Amino acid sequence: MEYEFEGRTEKEAIDRAAESLGLAKEAFDVEIIESRRQVLFKKGYVKIRVHIGQSSPVTADRDDEGEAPSGISELEKKQFTDAVFGNPEAQNDFEQKLIDFTQGLISRMGYTAKVTVLFREDRKIGLKMDSQFSSILIGKKGKNLDALQLLVNIYAGRQGREDVRIILDTENYRIHREESLVRLAYTVADRVRDSRSSVLLEPMNPFDRRLIHTTLSDIADVETKSEGEGLYKQVRVYYRGRR
């Protein structure tokens, strides 16, 4: 399901989305559709699109007493709430199921990988895939990795954990991808300012597009906007001139 919200800043728009949908901010994905920096005589403006999984209810994930979803023990609740780093082994049944499911997916693709826990944060778990076939698991522009991650998140939802987002990574691809996108954003911004025109970037997933929007949001004479339909849209970077 998708919903759109507006605000003067990205934070304000996300806060409105969380309040309107009754969800924690970590429970949904945010895509910045349009971003305009505040300039003289003109307020800032951000329009976002919120993506919620098919199985995610548009209600709060906790009851009035702040209890975790049913079926989760106090020990598991603490393990999901407290950030835990340095222990790659599964700490509860849910993490073990995620590992087994991910390894099973890769096995059915015809490859092998050792899956461990990369990090734990509040409502977010990172899984690391160590494999000699990492390049295949990543795919072109990370599309295979995105597809695997989507399937694992759907599986987590079917386990009653729509409140937890699963992040898959291998060979630190996502970190390197972020660094590459930031460099690309600044390079394109310079080109746009020199040519006084616009540049349309390659199709990207919501996370990558949001990174481009956020990176260039502080450049006064450059703005960005998502174009196209479907999950993989394109970001147009265009020159507005100083106001």
Image: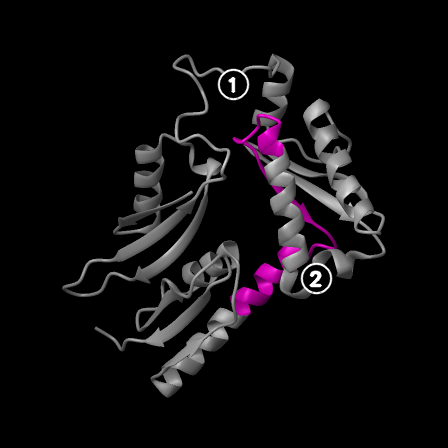
Q: Is residue 151 magenta?
A: no
Q: Quadrant of residue 36?
A: bottom left
Q: Is residue 75 visible?
A: yes
Query: What span is colored magenta in the figure?
Result: 156-183
Q: Residue at x 35, y 83 (%)?
A: 197
Q: Residue at x 25, y 52 (%)?
A: 8
* Secondary element type, mark 1: loop
Colouring convention used in this rendered image of the protein: one colour
Q: Mark 1 belongs to which amino acid?
A: Ala
Q: Is residue 92 visible?
A: no
- Which residue occupies the foreground of this view, 109 or 206? 109
Of discs 2 and 1, which sits in the foreground? Answer: 2
Mark 2 and mark 1 in contact? Answer it, CB < 8 Å: no
* As drawn, 237 above or below 78: below
Q: Position of residue 204 (x, y in %)?
A: 52, 63
Q: Position of residue 59 (x, y in %)?
A: 39, 27
* Secondary element type, mark 2: loop
Q: Position of residue 230 (x, y in %)?
A: 47, 58
| Residue placed under numbered mark 1 in the picture | 68
Q: Position of residue 183 (x, y in %)?
A: 54, 70
Q: Quadrant of residue 180?
A: bottom right
* Mark 2, other Cα within 10 Å: few <14 / some 14–19 / many ≥20: few
Split into 4 quadrants, where in the image is the N terminus? top left
Count of marks placed on residues: 2
* As drawn, 124 above or below 62: below
Q: Mark 2 belongs to which amino acid?
A: Gly
| Residue placed under numbered mark 2 in the picture | 139
Q: Residue at x 38, y 14 (%)?
A: 64
